[in-house]
Image (cartoon, rainbow, N blue to C red):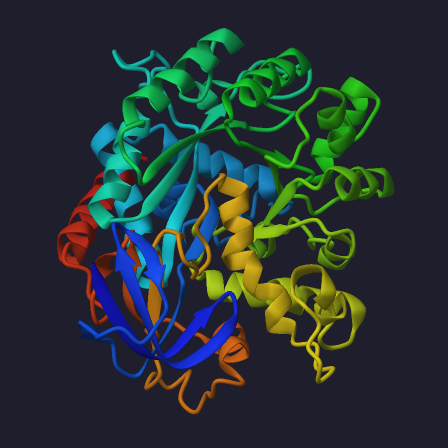
Amino acid sequence: MTTYRARYLLTEDGVTEHGVFTVKNGRFSAFDDAPVDVDLGQVAVTAGLINAHSHAFQRAIRGRTEYLDAARREEDFWSWRQLMYGTALTLAPEDIEAVSAMAFLEMALTGITTVGEFHYIHHQPDGRPYADPNTLAHHVIEAARKVGLRIALLRVAYNRGGYQRDAGSDQRRFIEPDVQTYLRRVDALDAHWGHDPKVTIGMAPHSIRAVPGPWLEAIAAHAHASGYVIHIHACEQRRELEESRAEYGAEPVRVLADRGMLSAKTTLVHATHLDREALSLMREIRPTVCACPTTERNLGDGFLPAQELAAGGVPIALGSDSQANIDLWAEMRLVEYHERLRAERRNVLAAHHGVWAPTPKNGQLRTADVLWPMGTQHGARSLGLDSGRVAVGAPADFVTLDLNAPCLAGLSAETLKSDLVFSTAHGAVKDTFVAGDRILADGIHPNADRIIERYRATLKRIKSHQ
């Protein structure tokens, strides 16, 4: 048991100056004036951020796709995807772990305490399963353990290249032969890691492009019976909508609802192209939407209809997705900034204050109150966790932010949340704690040099084979 004091403490009830809190058995146990063991100093303590959608291996292609091929001037998501596939084919198990550890280290340095890893590289480079079909998932989880993050491994189901298209040879590491095999492998992964309180398993049909209708139904039934959360890419690209209409005569959200896949334990990743019927279904059922604004901008996906979702009470979580940049503070503010560009006015989401936060008596509807749950509680909801909050009984996953960091200098108790949401920059996170364990101290991770060195060696090897 350890009792801490900080200049500011941000809990569910608001900001406490010179806040004192106790951590016992990895959870917050009390908020009172008990004798202090550790004075954290001039910092603000908040819940750790929750990254609900990550493809860790894509950290290896950062910076390598930012060009236009003169022979292919219509460069878009689909050509980016081919470059990503090429990298996926080169990664050995130890490479997967090294690249994942690099992505997870960067997350810890920026205040992320939990990652939802949407994992779809399963097999050997020639497409044959490993002796243990979950070998690569184990390596990803081990990478999170070495960094110290909490991880929800969302094992992906992938069966085809799209409507009326078999999987391509460049997708061979992703493919399962049938849905029953996929379900068995998910359960085996869950059984293997069930002892570890920092590891959970979820189900992730990749998309309705990659998984046919009978698979969707079988996965939904298994998830509902077993309690797994479901994550699925949905409505990210217009081509996906066209294929859905061609195959099912309906757009993706309706297809998912009709096959039992849409529930409060479902997360739709991206959802940048939603029609009126989709929004109506989502207001009724209230799945989580995971927005990844940096990646969506990088890939030219389009804008999340955040105002329409917030008005309907649909929770929005956040993800770093392709790892083009790992900064959930930026993702949080981008949800609002994109709405300002769409609406051509300021503080757009503040109008939905009463949905996610009580309306203050002074009449000031703070935009940060609406955005804050996106990086915390909504991410926890998406992953089926009880974290994302500083409250008695919740896991002690928290971060400290340096009040002497230039980006935060001058903040007050009154402006704390707004300053954090709109101004936090790299280097402001001082300490990161997961289940009460300090994995980052004074901005330094004990394994950082080793992880970075191994990553650089891995990247050099990958490039030599492409």
Residue drawn at x 64%, y 65% as measured from the top left: 370
Instruction: Say whether residue 297 is visible.
Output: yes
Q: Residue 454: x percent and y percent?
A: 17, 46
The picture places residue 206, in percent across and down from the top left corner, at 55, 28
Give how far across and how far down residue 226 sits, in percent: 50, 20
Up the image or down, 51 lies above or below 97; here it is below
* Left or right: 405, with 353 as reference point: left
The vertical placement of 60 against 412, above or below, is above
| Corner quadrant of residue 391 | bottom left
**Which x, y percent locates residue 209?**
64, 25
Residue 324 sits in which quadrant?
Answer: bottom left
In the orientation shown, which residue stands out farthest toward the bottom? 410
At x 44%, y 62%, the residue is 327
Q: Nearer the viewer, residue 352 or 329?
A: 352
Give the camera-side residue of 235 and 76: 235
Between 148 and 100, which is closer to the camera in this rendering? 148
Left or right: 70 in relation to 184: right
In-image side of 217 versus 118 (left or right): right
Is 466 placed above or below 433 here? above
Viewer can see residue 125: no
Q: Is residue 168 above or below residue 433?
A: above
Residue found at x 24% / y 36%: 142
Give the quadrant of the N terminus: bottom left
Q: Is residue 31 left or right of residue 365?
A: left
How many labels, in total?
0
Residues 194 and 159: in front is: 194
Residue found 32% across the figure and 35% down from its top: 466
